[in-house]
C-alpha cells in the first residue's frame, strides 16, 4: 500500500501563487506515475497534471503555462507550483499515484487539500 498526504492549500487572491506538496509513504518503490486532480463543487474530478518517474509530464490545457508539476523521488514528494491563479482554479486538489506508467494515476489517493482563489 501507498499513503499520500497533501499540504499547501489555502486562500489566495486572483493572480497569486500556491505550492502544493504530496508526500508518499509505504511501498513508494512501486510508484510510477503521480498526479494532481481537482474537484470543484458540483463538478466532476479532473486530472490537472501528471508526472512519471522519468519526469514526463502532462497538463490540462487550462493550466498550461501557469502550473508546474515536479517530483523529488529521493524524498518521495511531488509538487504542484500554481501561479497566476484564477477563481476557476478553486477546488479540492487531490494527489494520486499509480503503479503503472499511465497518464491518469488512480491506484492511490490522498485526502485532498482545499484551494480557494478569491476575485
Image: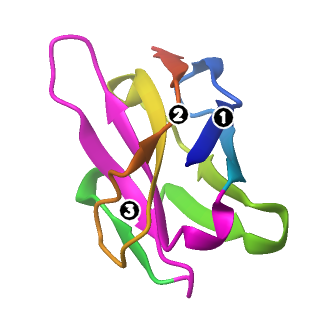
Q: Residue at x 68, y 50 (%)?
A: 24
User: Which quadrant holds the C terminus?
Assistant: top left
| Residue to which mark 2 is pinned | 110
User: Magenta segment, which residues?
Assistant: 27-55
Looking at the image, is 3 positioned above or below residue 91? Answer: below
Q: Is residue 51 magenta?
A: yes
Please state which of the two labelled residues, at mark 2 or mark 3, is closer to the viewer.
2
| Residue to which mark 1 is pinned | 5
Q: CA distance from mark 1 to mark 3?
A: 24 Å
Please state which of the two labelled residues, at mark 1 or mark 3, is closer to the viewer.
1
Counting residues from the N terminus, which is met first, the one under dot 1 or under dot 2?
1
Left or right, residue 83 beside residue 21: left
Label count reads 3
> Does dot 1 land on a helix, a strand or a loop?
strand
Circles 1, 2 touching at the beta carbon (< 8 Å): yes
> Does dot 2 land on a helix, a strand or a loop?
loop
Comparing 66 with 103, the one in front is 103
Q: Is residue 35 magenta?
A: yes
Residue 17 visible, this orientation: no
Q: Position of residue 38 (x, y in %)?
A: 36, 34
Asked where in the image residue 19 lies, by quadrant, the reply is top right
| Residue to which mark 3 is pinned | 64
Amino acid at each position: 500500500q501507498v499513503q499520500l498526504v497533501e499540504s499547501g492549500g489555502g486562500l489566495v487572491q486572483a493572480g497569486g501563487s500556491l505550492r502544493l506538496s504530496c508526500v508518499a509513504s509505504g511501498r513508494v518503490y512501486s510508484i510510477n506515475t503521480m498526479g494532481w486532480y481537482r474537484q470543484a463543487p458540483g463538478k466532476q474530478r479532473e486530472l490537472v497534471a501528471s508526472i512519471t518517474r522519468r519526469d514526463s509530464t502532462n497538463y490540462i490545457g487550462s493550466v498550461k503555462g501557469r502550473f508546474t508539476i515536479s517530483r523529488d523521488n529521493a524524498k518521495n514528494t511531488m509538487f504542484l507550483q500554481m501561479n497566476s491563479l484564477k477563481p476557476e482554479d478553486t477546488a479540492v486538489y487531490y494527489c494520486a499515484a499509480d503503479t503503472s506508467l499511465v497518464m491518469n494515476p488512480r491506484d492511490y489517493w490522498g485526502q485532498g487539500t482545499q484551494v480557494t482563489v478569491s476575485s
